[in-house]
Protein backbone atom coordinates (compact mmCIF):
# COMPACT_ATOMS: atom_id res chain seq x y z
CA UNK A 1 0.00 0.00 0.00
CA UNK A 2 1.31 3.43 -0.91
CA UNK A 3 1.66 6.19 1.67
CA UNK A 4 -1.04 8.18 -0.16
CA UNK A 5 -3.49 5.26 -0.03
CA UNK A 6 -2.76 4.62 3.65
CA UNK A 7 -3.13 8.33 4.48
CA UNK A 8 -6.49 8.92 2.78
CA UNK A 9 -8.74 7.27 5.42
CA UNK A 10 -6.81 9.04 8.19
CA UNK A 11 -7.18 12.38 6.42
CA UNK A 12 -10.90 11.66 5.99
CA UNK A 13 -11.25 10.90 9.70
CA UNK A 14 -9.55 14.20 10.53
CA UNK A 15 -11.77 16.11 8.10
CA UNK A 16 -15.04 14.52 9.19
CA UNK A 17 -14.57 14.51 12.97
CA UNK A 18 -17.27 16.42 14.82
CA UNK A 19 -14.85 17.65 17.46
CA UNK A 20 -11.16 17.63 18.34
CA UNK A 21 -9.08 17.67 21.51
CA UNK A 22 -6.39 20.37 21.46
CA UNK A 23 -3.44 20.01 23.80
CA UNK A 24 -1.13 22.96 24.45
CA UNK A 25 1.48 23.67 27.11
CA UNK A 26 1.30 26.40 29.77
CA UNK A 27 4.33 28.56 30.53
CA UNK A 28 5.06 26.46 33.62
CA UNK A 29 5.07 23.24 31.58
CA UNK A 30 1.64 21.95 32.61
CA UNK A 31 -0.51 20.61 29.76
CA UNK A 32 -3.83 22.19 28.88
CA UNK A 33 -6.36 20.14 26.90
CA UNK A 34 -9.80 21.20 25.67
CA UNK A 35 -12.32 20.02 23.06
CA UNK A 36 -13.11 22.28 20.12
CA UNK A 37 -15.01 22.25 16.84
CA UNK A 38 -12.78 22.48 13.82
CA UNK A 39 -12.27 21.89 10.11
CA UNK A 40 -9.54 20.36 7.97
CA UNK A 41 -7.85 23.05 5.87
CA UNK A 42 -4.55 23.04 4.00
CA UNK A 43 -3.13 19.98 5.76
CA UNK A 44 -4.13 20.98 9.26
CA UNK A 45 -6.92 21.39 11.80
CA UNK A 46 -8.36 24.88 12.18
CA UNK A 47 -10.40 26.03 15.17
CA UNK A 48 -11.68 29.36 16.45
CA UNK A 49 -11.69 30.43 20.06
CA UNK A 50 -11.70 33.48 22.31
CA UNK A 51 -8.45 35.36 21.84
CA UNK A 52 -7.87 35.61 25.59
CA UNK A 53 -8.33 31.86 26.17
CA UNK A 54 -5.65 29.76 27.81
CA UNK A 55 -4.99 27.74 24.67
CA UNK A 56 -4.35 30.88 22.62
CA UNK A 57 -2.05 32.31 25.30
CA UNK A 58 -0.19 29.01 25.32
CA UNK A 59 0.13 28.85 21.53
CA UNK A 60 1.39 32.42 21.31
CA UNK A 61 4.21 31.47 23.68
CA UNK A 62 4.81 27.95 22.32
CA UNK A 63 3.24 27.11 18.96
CA UNK A 64 3.65 23.35 19.32
CA UNK A 65 0.35 21.53 19.79
CA UNK A 66 -1.18 18.08 19.68
CA UNK A 67 -4.64 17.41 18.27
CA UNK A 68 -6.41 14.10 18.67
CA UNK A 69 -9.79 12.67 17.87
CA UNK A 70 -12.08 11.35 20.57
CA UNK A 71 -12.09 7.64 19.77
CA UNK A 72 -9.93 5.23 21.76
CA UNK A 73 -10.82 2.46 19.31
CA UNK A 74 -9.69 4.28 16.15
CA UNK A 75 -6.90 6.50 17.41
CA UNK A 76 -5.67 9.51 15.41
CA UNK A 77 -3.12 11.88 16.96
CA UNK A 78 -1.68 14.88 15.12
CA UNK A 79 1.42 16.76 16.26
CA UNK A 80 2.09 20.10 14.65
CA UNK A 81 2.78 23.81 14.84
CA UNK A 82 -0.01 26.36 15.19
CA UNK A 83 -0.34 29.68 13.42
CA UNK A 84 -3.03 32.33 13.70
CA UNK A 85 -4.95 32.97 10.50
CA UNK A 86 -5.49 36.68 9.87
CA UNK A 87 -5.99 37.13 6.12
CA UNK A 88 -9.46 38.10 4.89
CA UNK A 89 -9.55 35.56 2.06
CA UNK A 90 -8.31 32.72 4.23
CA UNK A 91 -10.80 33.52 6.99
CA UNK A 92 -13.62 33.62 4.46
CA UNK A 93 -12.55 30.28 3.02
CA UNK A 94 -12.34 28.67 6.46
CA UNK A 95 -15.67 30.18 7.49
CA UNK A 96 -17.33 28.53 4.50
CA UNK A 97 -15.93 25.16 5.65
CA UNK A 98 -17.44 25.73 9.11
CA UNK A 99 -20.76 26.68 7.45
CA UNK A 100 -20.79 23.41 5.50
CA UNK A 101 -19.78 21.25 8.43
CA UNK A 102 -21.70 22.74 11.35
CA UNK A 103 -24.46 24.97 9.89
CA UNK A 104 -25.91 22.70 7.18
CA UNK A 105 -24.36 24.90 4.53
CA UNK A 106 -26.07 28.11 5.61
CA UNK A 107 -23.73 30.79 4.28
CA UNK A 108 -22.04 33.31 6.57
CA UNK A 109 -23.11 31.58 9.76
CA UNK A 110 -19.42 31.50 10.65
CA UNK A 111 -18.23 34.97 9.72
CA UNK A 112 -14.66 34.57 10.89
CA UNK A 113 -13.58 37.96 9.55
CA UNK A 114 -16.00 39.72 11.91
CA UNK A 115 -15.28 37.21 14.66
CA UNK A 116 -11.58 38.01 14.55
CA UNK A 117 -12.32 41.75 14.64
CA UNK A 118 -14.36 41.06 17.78
CA UNK A 119 -11.48 39.35 19.58
CA UNK A 120 -11.66 35.75 18.41
CA UNK A 121 -8.53 33.91 17.33
CA UNK A 122 -8.53 31.47 14.42
CA UNK A 123 -5.71 28.96 14.77
CA UNK A 124 -4.46 26.33 12.33
CA UNK A 125 -2.38 23.39 13.56
CA UNK A 126 -0.54 22.07 10.53
CA UNK A 127 0.21 18.36 10.60
CA UNK A 128 3.88 17.45 11.03
CA UNK A 129 3.45 13.94 12.45
CA UNK A 130 0.24 11.91 12.51
CA UNK A 131 -0.08 8.60 14.34
CA UNK A 132 -2.89 6.10 13.94
CA UNK A 133 -3.82 2.72 15.36
CA UNK A 134 -6.86 0.60 16.16
CA UNK A 135 -7.49 -0.81 19.60
CA UNK A 136 -7.91 -4.33 18.23
CA UNK A 137 -4.54 -4.17 16.43
CA UNK A 138 -2.46 -1.63 18.33
CA UNK A 139 0.86 -3.24 17.40
CA UNK A 140 0.29 -2.26 13.77
CA UNK A 141 0.37 1.48 14.26
CA UNK A 142 1.03 3.92 11.44
CA UNK A 143 3.21 7.03 11.62
CA UNK A 144 3.05 9.65 8.90
CA UNK A 145 5.34 12.59 8.29
CA UNK A 146 5.05 14.99 5.36
CA UNK A 147 7.54 16.13 2.72
CA UNK A 148 8.08 19.73 1.64
CA UNK A 149 5.13 19.49 -0.78
CA UNK A 150 2.80 18.13 1.90
CA UNK A 151 2.81 14.57 0.58
CA UNK A 152 2.54 11.89 3.28
CA UNK A 153 5.52 9.70 4.10
CA UNK A 154 4.63 6.48 5.89
CA UNK A 155 7.27 5.26 8.34
CA UNK A 156 7.94 1.56 8.41
CA UNK A 157 6.17 0.10 11.45
CA UNK A 158 8.47 -1.22 14.11
CA UNK A 159 8.32 -4.99 14.29
CA UNK A 160 7.20 -6.39 17.60
CA UNK A 161 9.35 -9.12 19.12
CA UNK A 162 7.95 -12.62 19.34
CA UNK A 163 7.83 -13.06 23.11
CA UNK A 164 6.37 -16.54 22.92
CA UNK A 165 9.81 -18.05 22.30
CA UNK A 166 11.10 -16.42 25.49
CA UNK A 167 8.31 -17.80 27.69
CA UNK A 168 9.61 -20.57 29.98
CA UNK A 169 8.17 -23.98 29.15
CA UNK A 170 6.50 -25.24 32.32
CA UNK A 171 4.36 -27.92 30.75
CA UNK A 172 0.76 -27.92 29.69
CA UNK A 173 -0.49 -28.66 33.21
CA UNK A 174 0.54 -25.23 34.55
CA UNK A 175 -1.87 -22.36 34.13
CA UNK A 176 -1.38 -18.73 33.21
CA UNK A 177 -1.15 -17.71 36.88
CA UNK A 178 1.79 -20.06 37.42
CA UNK A 179 3.52 -18.74 34.32
CA UNK A 180 3.02 -15.16 35.51
CA UNK A 181 4.55 -16.07 38.86
CA UNK A 182 7.58 -17.57 37.14
CA UNK A 183 7.98 -14.42 35.08
CA UNK A 184 8.07 -12.36 38.28
CA UNK A 185 10.47 -14.80 39.91
CA UNK A 186 12.75 -14.72 36.86
CA UNK A 187 12.75 -10.93 36.87
CA UNK A 188 13.53 -10.76 40.58
CA UNK A 189 16.35 -13.26 40.15
CA UNK A 190 17.78 -11.01 37.45
CA UNK A 191 17.65 -8.07 39.85
CA UNK A 192 14.85 -6.27 38.04
CA UNK A 193 12.19 -4.43 39.94
CA UNK A 194 8.74 -5.79 39.17
CA UNK A 195 5.91 -3.30 39.51
CA UNK A 196 2.33 -4.49 40.00
CA UNK A 197 -0.18 -3.65 37.26
Image (spheres, rainbow, N blue to C red):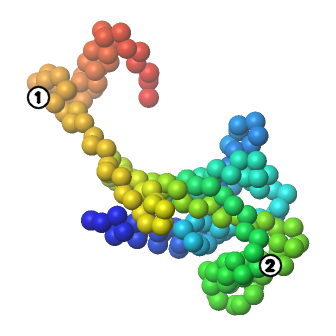
Callout 2: 10 Å neighbours few (<14), some, many (20+)? some
Residue 168: horizontal and vertical position, in percent? 17, 22
Q: Secondary structure at mark 1?
A: loop
Residue 180: horizontal and vertical position, in percent? 28, 24
Residue name at image x 36 percent, y 52 percent:
155
| Residue that mark 1 sits on | 172
Residue name at image x 78 percent, y 65 percent:
121
Residue 99: horizontal and vertical position, in percent? 67, 84
Residue 192: horizontal and vertical position, in percent? 37, 14
130 lies left or right of 62:
left
Residue 72 — which label?
none
From the viewer's perspective, is residue 14 above or below residue 166? below
Residue farthest to the right?
118
From the viewer's perspective, is residue 175 above or below residue 156? above
Callout 1: 10 Å neighbours few (<14), some, many (20+)? few
Residue 113 — which label?
2
On-image quarter of the N terminus: bottom left
Sequence-earlier tag: 2 or 1: 2
Q: Nearer the viewer, mark 2 or mark 1?
A: 2
On-image quarter of the C terminus: top left
Residue 130 visible in the picture: yes
Amino acid sequence: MTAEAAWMPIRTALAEAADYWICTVRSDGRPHTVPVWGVWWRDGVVFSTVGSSMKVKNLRANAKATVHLGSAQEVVILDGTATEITGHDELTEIGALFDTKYASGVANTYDLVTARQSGMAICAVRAEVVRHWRSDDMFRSQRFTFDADGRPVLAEPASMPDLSSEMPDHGAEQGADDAQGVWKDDAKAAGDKVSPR
